[in-house]
Amino acid sequence: MKIFVLVKEVPDTYGDRTLNLETGLAERAGGDVVLDEITERALEVALSYADSHEGTEVVALSMAPETSTATVRRALAIGAASAVHIADEQLAGADLGLTAETLAAAIRRGAPDLVITGNLSTDGSGGVIPAMLAEHLGFAQATALSSVEITDEAVTGTRAADAGSQPVSAPLPAVISITEALPDARFPNFKGIMAAKKKPLEVLSLADLDVSADPSAAPRTIMTSVAAKPPRAAGVKITDEGDAAAQLVDYLVQNRLV
C-alpha cells in the first residue's frame, strides 16, 4: 500500500504570531517555524500501519517555501520513506482553492491508495482541504476521525458527534483527516535524523504539476481588506447592591448568552 501524508510548516504557536497588514499574510520570517503537530499525528497513523504491514510506502507531501526543506526533512526523520516538496514563488499566499488543486495534482502524480491529513492546520484553520482533495481526486472521504483502522480494501474510523460517536467507513482509494484524539508522533532519534539526509526528497514546481496560479485560469478567493485585531476592551463590572443577580441576568439576556 502507498500512503501519502500531508505535512505542513507553520509558525510556532509558542511564539508571537503577527499578520502583515499590507499583504494580509502571516509573518513567517520573524519567528520560529515547526512541523504542525496535527500533521505529525497524521504521519504517526501511517507509520503505525506500516510498522505491521510490510511493503507499505509512506510519502510525506508538503507545499511550502523553498526555505522549508529542513522542516520537510523532519517528516523523513520521523519515519516517512520519501517526501515531495512543492515549492514555487507563485504559491505565496495561495488560497484554499489553489492549495487543494496543487496538492491534488501532486497526489494524482504519485497514485497513492490512501491520503491522510490533519483536520485543520494551526495557522489557517480552514478545515476544508481534505474534502476539496477528495473532490479533485474522485476519492472517497472520511473526515475528522478520532480513531482509524486501515485494511487492504477500506479505511474505517470513528467521528465525534453531538450526541456521541459515529462509525464511518470509506473504500480505498480515500482521503481521511484525523483529530488530536490520535496519538502523538514518535520522536525522531539520531538514526532517523541521519537517515533522513539520504532519503529521496523531490522538489516540484507548478509547471511540473501543470497547475496555473493565474486568477483568470480558475476562480480564486480575493482578499478585500485586512485589519489588526482590536485591543481587548475592559469587561463589565457588576457592583452588588442587592441586585447583582438581576444585573447578571440582564447582561446575559442583552448579549444573547441565555
Image (spheres, grey):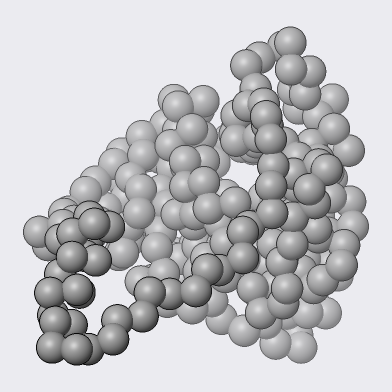
Question: In this view of the protein, which residue sits in the foreground, 119 or 236?
Answer: 236
Q: Residue furthest left?
A: 163
Q: Does residue 254 show up?
A: yes
Q: Residue furthest front?
A: 241
Residue 10 in which image quadrant: bottom right
In this image, 211 relative to 134: left or right? Answer: right
Q: Does residue 51 show up?
A: no
The tally of labels here is 0
Residue at the spot x=10%, y=59% of the render? 163
Residue at the spot x=76%, y=88% of the render? 190
Position of residue 198 measured from the top left corner of the image (x, y, whole percent): 85, 67
Position of residue 189 measured from the top left corner of the image (x, y, whole percent): 70, 87
Residue 145 in which image quadrant: bottom left
Position of residue 174 measured from the top left corner of the image (x, y, whole percent): 41, 40
Position of residue 59 measured from the top left corner of the image (x, y, whole percent): 64, 54
Residue at the spot x=12%, y=74% of the render? 246
In this image, 48 relative to 87: left or right? Answer: left
Residue at the spot x=60%, y=35% of the render? 96
